[in-house]
Structures are given as C-alpha cells and as structure tokens.
Image (tube, grey):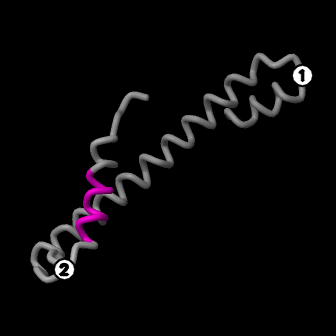
Amino acid sequence: MPFDLSDLERRYSELELELRNPELIKNQRLYSASARKLSELSRVLAVWNNYKKTSQDFEGAKSLLDDQNLQIRQMAQSEIE
C-alpha cells in the first residue's frame, strides 16, 4: 500500500485510553481537545480502513483471474469492474 497510517492508528488508541483517565476528565479544556482530536482521527481512519478493505478485496479478486474455473474468473472480473 502506498500509505502507512499506523502512527495515526496508534495515536487513536492512545487518545481512547487518555479519555478514560479520571484526571483528564477533571480538566475539561484538555478533555475537549483530546475528544476533538479523537473525532478527527476517527473520520480519517474510517476512510483509511475502508480503503484497506477495498484494496484487499481487489487483490483477492485479481488473484482469481487466473483460476481454471471459468465461472470463478467471470465472478472475479465482475468484482473488479
């Protein structure tokens, strides 16, 4: 894949944990800032996860184009299109 958003995924997980911290909850300014960041990252990661799934599905269908079974090849071709 041309992109690697693992740092953003890691940051998302960190923010989820931070938002459960009672000390952070007491500081509304920091809590709100962290919640906003989490919301922004969740939108980006939703698109990213959709891209990864679509890319995996495409590669899987592409690999079936060489199958000996004509029906499998036709099904794969229709998935790609």
How many marks are shown on the rendered structure?
2
Main SS of the magenta part reads: helix
**Residue of label 1:** 69
Q: Is residue 45 above or below residue 76?
A: below
Q: Answer whether residue 3 is magenta in the image.
A: no
> What is the span of residues highlighted in magenta in the rendered image?
11-19
- Residue 27 picture quarter: bottom left
Q: Is residue 39 left or right of residue 34?
A: right
User: Which dot marks residue 4?
Assistant: none
Q: CA distance from mark 1 to mark 2?
A: 59 Å
Q: Is residue 4 above or below residue 37?
A: above
Residue at the image position 62 percent from the left and 33 percent from the top: 58
Please name whichever residue, 8 or 73, is drawn nearer the observer in this view of the structure: 8
Please name whichever residue, 47 or 4, is drawn nearer the observer in this view of the structure: 4
**Position in image of residue 52 (x %, y %):** 50, 40
**Residue of label 2:** 25
Q: Is residue 35 left or right of residue 81?
A: left
**Secondary structure beneath disc 2?**
helix
Q: Is residue 1 left or right of residue 32?
A: right
Look at the image and tell me in which quarter the N terminus lies: top left
Q: Are marks 1 and 2 in contact (CB under 8 Å)?
A: no
Residue at the image position 38 percent from the left and 52 percent from the top: 45
**Position in image of residue 15 (x %, y %):** 26, 61
Amino acid type indicated by mark 2? Ile
**Secondary structure beneath disc 1?**
loop
- Please name which of the two marks, 1 or 2, marks the residue nearer to the observer: 2
Amino acid type indicated by mark 1? Asn
**Position in image of residue 48 (x %, y %):** 42, 46
- Residue 56 picture quarter: top right
Upstream in sequence: badge 1 or badge 2: 2
Q: Is residue 81 above or below residue 46?
A: above
